[in-house]
Amino acid sequence: MTASTPIHHARYLVLGSGLAGLYFALEVADRGPVVILTKHRAESSNTRWAQGGISAVFSGDDSLEEHIEDTLAVGAGLCNRDMVTYAVQRGPTLVRRLAERYGVRFDRVGGDEHAPFELGREGGHSRRRVVHHRDTTGHEIERALLAAAHAHPNITIHEHHTVIDLLSWSKVDGSRGCFGVYALNSAADRVEAFVAPITVLATGGAGRVYRYTTNPAVATGDGVAVAYRIGAAVANLEFMQFHPTCLHHPDANTFLISEALRGEGGILRRADGSDLMAERHPMGSLAPRDVVAREIDAELKRSGERCVFLDMTHLDPDYVVARFPAIHARCMSVGIDMRKDPIPVVPAAHYMCGGVVVDRHGRTEIPGLMAIGEVAMSGLHGACRLASNSLLEAVVLADGAAQACEDFGRGPPAHVNPWNEGAARDSDEAVMVSANWEEVRAAMWNFVGIVRSDKRLERGRRRLDLIREEILEYYWKFRVTRDVLELRNISLVGSLIIECARQRKESRGLHYTIDYPGMRDDQAHDTILDKRSGPRA
């Protein structure tokens, strides 16, 4: 393996095959060869599981100003107003482009393909502005963009490739910059190098850092980890959004119950049938996600119950099935008919509001390295994400990166060192990987969850420090596998989340601590880490 590392060249290297990565690839593909790496199948992205939709202003009774203000209000004083304004203004144009240029079949009023978009409403929105495809919007976006990518002669997708680390100019000539990656080709069981002037992180989130999550198995924080190791700044990782309504059932415990159900009139109820949110927030069950998740968490701790319930039984049953066919089918598969039965739900880790620090065009502080989508921290979300602003950010950053990338990198060096595995050998201790994987996720759930304290954060930090020592020893001793690479990444991202949380001596947005229950104006700043100020990489 050491002397025969395959080296692939491209003009643009994209890591990830969700909305952000695919949209960027399609927008630049006419300029030169694009290589997309994805560690599982091409369709296995966070985008595919997005149910609600993409927020943008299309209604006559709505305005860009109202969308901006809703985003700022939910962001709890930490949004970058310029970025919010830019994203909201770009939203309608880019949603139309997804439909008209790339064939995304958003729902239209009356089912007429020439009619206006049908708009839903979700938590924190004062108006209906969520463009959707039934309750499988992400799946439809993924379908359309993947079809377009497969049809473009300049786009090549490599499945089953897991990034090990970014290639750094510092090891070539001492300068700062990125020119590609080493990646493990799991299908061929070998390490390969991919080099390009521009490397784009579109790797999604990190929900798998937690024991309970709505995220698919691929969401292990890889982009944040590799960017941090090369020296990029990361920020606001304490703001992990816990979705209030994940289906509570032993056969479906990662299945998301979209916020759009509450947008159509669903009510959160306690086990005794009373309205959980009636006197907790003016918007009731449609309150922002951080508020609802904390109320559910408090209710479960107070009552000792295992879940609360989302009640749709008072609504027109035919409309419920037509509007939410996939959710209805999944619930029916486990014996829950949401036309007649309240849906048992619990909070679960869902969306990473922090990430790799970027500008509005997805540029990091590392020349040649861009980050777009959930992996990025652009300032749009602040301390809490407004529902369906995630897909909006993905397409806005991808579009900006496609415009700005040409002047951001430089050609790779003439010689690329082959992957050097040293004295590494095949593992005979695989049980260590699975055991540490569970320990990391348990520690994060127990000590860095919905409600935090200084004591819990310190306990989590100590546990992860010990676990990371074992993981790094294992990493250098044995040949790399996807499991080991993901474990190395989630343990680092867990430590980064904890360090960001320890720095925030207040409760704001998604970060709630019993030691500092109030929000303080003098703490309204981003928690920024890099290798000089943060945990050992």
Image (cartoon, rainbow, N blue to C red):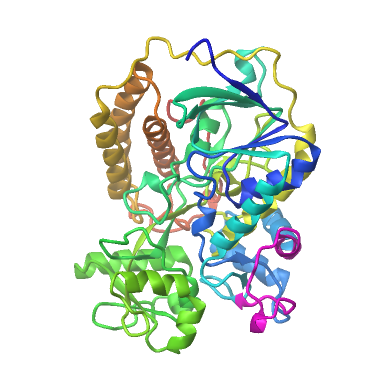
Foreground pick, 263 / 79:
263
Q: Report which quarter residue 112 is drawn in.
A: bottom right
> Which residues are drawn in magenta?
91-119
- Residue occupying image coordinates x 23% and y 31%: 431
* Above-or-below relation of 61 to 85: below
Position of residue 379 in the picture relative to residue 401 (left or right):
left
Q: Where is residue 335 in the image (x, y as percent from the top left)?
A: 28, 74
Residue 386 shown in magenta: no
Q: Is residue 112 covered in magenta?
A: yes
| Residue 9 in the image, given as x and y percentages of width and height | 68, 25
How many marks can you see?
Answer: 0
Please say if 387 is above or below 237. Answer: below
Above or below — where is 272 with respect to 21?
below
In the image: residue 193, left or right of residue 265: right
317 left or right of 29 in image:
left
Q: Does residue 360 appear anywhere in the picture?
A: no
Relative to the observer, which residue lies in front, 367 or 235? Answer: 367
Question: How far from the left and from the top, in percent, is residue 142?
Answer: 58, 56
Image spot of residue 215 (x, y percent): 43, 53
Q: Report the front residue among 70 and 87.
A: 87
Q: In this view, does 168 lie to the left or right of 206?
A: right
**Which residue is at 49% across, 29% downward?**
185
User: From where the camera sits, is residue 218 visible?
Assistant: yes
Rendering quarter of residue 414: top right
* Quadrant assignment for the C terminus: top left
